Image: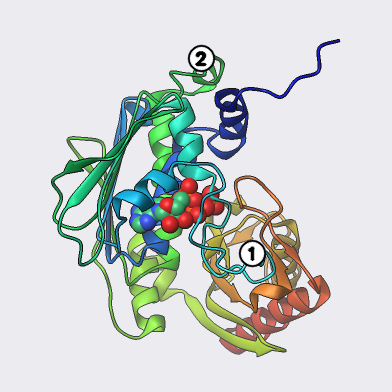
Amino acid sequence: MILRLLPKYVVNRIAAGEVVERPAAAVKELVENGIDAGARRIDVVVIDGGRGLISVVDDGRGMTAEELNLACERHATSKLPDDDLIRISSLGFRGEALPSIGAVSRLEITSRAKDADGAWSIRVEGGDKQAPAPAALGGGTRVEVRDLFYATPARLKFLKTARTEQNRCLEVMRRLAMAYPAIGFSLSDGSRKLLKLAPSPGELFVARLDRLAEIIGREFADNSSAIDAEREGMRLTGYAGLPTLNRGNGAMQFLFVNGRPISDRLLIGALRSAYREFLASDRYPLVALFLTLPPEMVDVNVHPAKTEVRFRDSGLVRGLIVGALKHALTKAG
Ligand SMILES: Nc1ncnc2c1ncn2[C@@H]1O[C@H](COP(=O)(O)OP(=O)(O)OP(=O)(O)O)[C@@H](O)[C@H]1O
Ligand SMILES: [Mg+2]
């Protein structure tokens, strides 16, 4: 047998397979980077379902030439200042997204750091990184991903139609946009705007309800109860749809943990039991709920796509959700 360490570009392509499963995953990573960078606007273009081009432009803090260079290396991150995986307060923390995308596409990042004299641009093609070069950009960061998965033809074959992949990108953005009403978001397919959300500054509950009305629909905003409950350092806020507003599946249940869209069995189970007395068992309520808790009470480092979490005390989380929703539904009913 020949036991050997794999070359770096192969290692990166393997890692990329977990981090960027499809175009929507790349969109998610890049939009999250914009959010972490303190952007007020994030504009996305997705052409040919993301296979042709994914472009994400933000007006966040930007990067210097040195930072650009490092950002494309694996395990380089500015988000774990003290190596502490217990207290993650940003959406990113692994330093995997950009190098992964760069390993399987033609990636170009142009960025201008706040207060910097000029902008810089860097290219990575199939994992091959070039040196940063001077470029033109007013501020913030522009990331362009071309020919996603050209370097991994097997993955390319698994992609669905451009329309399906585009819809997944839209879904990812809608979910993130629900959690960040103060940020303006847009998504276009190159000719048509698929999503256009103005930033809503101001009080979070008001801004959030406006944003939810835009994304889920006015009907939801008009037929839901505001939730605001606290227990032992955890806080549950958001809106729970009245039982009369229901669906045949759970597609309209939007759950967030510390600003992160999550699909989690524990949370779904808690919803189910909260609505049990109010809704037939084959009907699903509409909800948008935001759980915030001290980072050390939840582990987000569970799944490569960061869509699952583990709670230190799941009974406490469940109790908070069931209690708060039952209370609100009883009051409304
Ligand atoms: N849009 C952006 N604006 C400013 N800095 C950015 C932006 N995108 C990336 N960076 C910088 O590049 C680094 C690497 O980004 P990358 O997405 O690869 O990793 P991460 O966000 O730290 O962690 P994760 O892999 O979990 O996303 C970030 O830590 C950040 O410092
Ligand atoms: Mg990131």
Q: Which of the marked residues, 1 or 2, is nearer the chain's N terminus? A: 1
Secondary structure type for disc 1: loop
Residue 332's spot in the image, x, y percent? 56, 85
The count of marks equals 2
Question: What residue sits 51% from the left and 55% below the top?
Answer: 77
Is residue 79 shown above or below 237? above
Q: Is residue 144 left or right of residue 26?
A: left
Marks 1 and 2 sit apart, C-alpha to C-alpha, by: 36 Å
Dividing the picture into quadrants, the one containing residue 24 is: top left
Residue 244's spot in the image, x, y percent? 55, 68
On residue 227, the disc is none
**Residue ID for mark 1:** 83
Dividing the picture into quadrants, the one containing residue 168 is: top left
Q: Three-letter amino acid code at disc 2?
A: Pro
Q: Three-letter amino acid code at disc 1?
A: Asp
Q: How is the image coloured?
A: rainbow
Residue 312's spot in the image, x, y percent? 79, 71
Question: What residue sits 53% from the left and 36% below the top?
Answer: 20
**Residue ID for mark 2:** 153
Q: Is residue 137 in sight in this rendering?
A: yes
Name the image quarter holding the C terminus: bottom right
Residue 224 or residue 13, whichever sits in front: 13
Residue 87 or residue 246, whichever sits in front: 87
Q: Is residue 104 left or right of residue 147?
A: right
Is residue 232 shown above or below 186? below
Secondary structure type for disc 2: helix
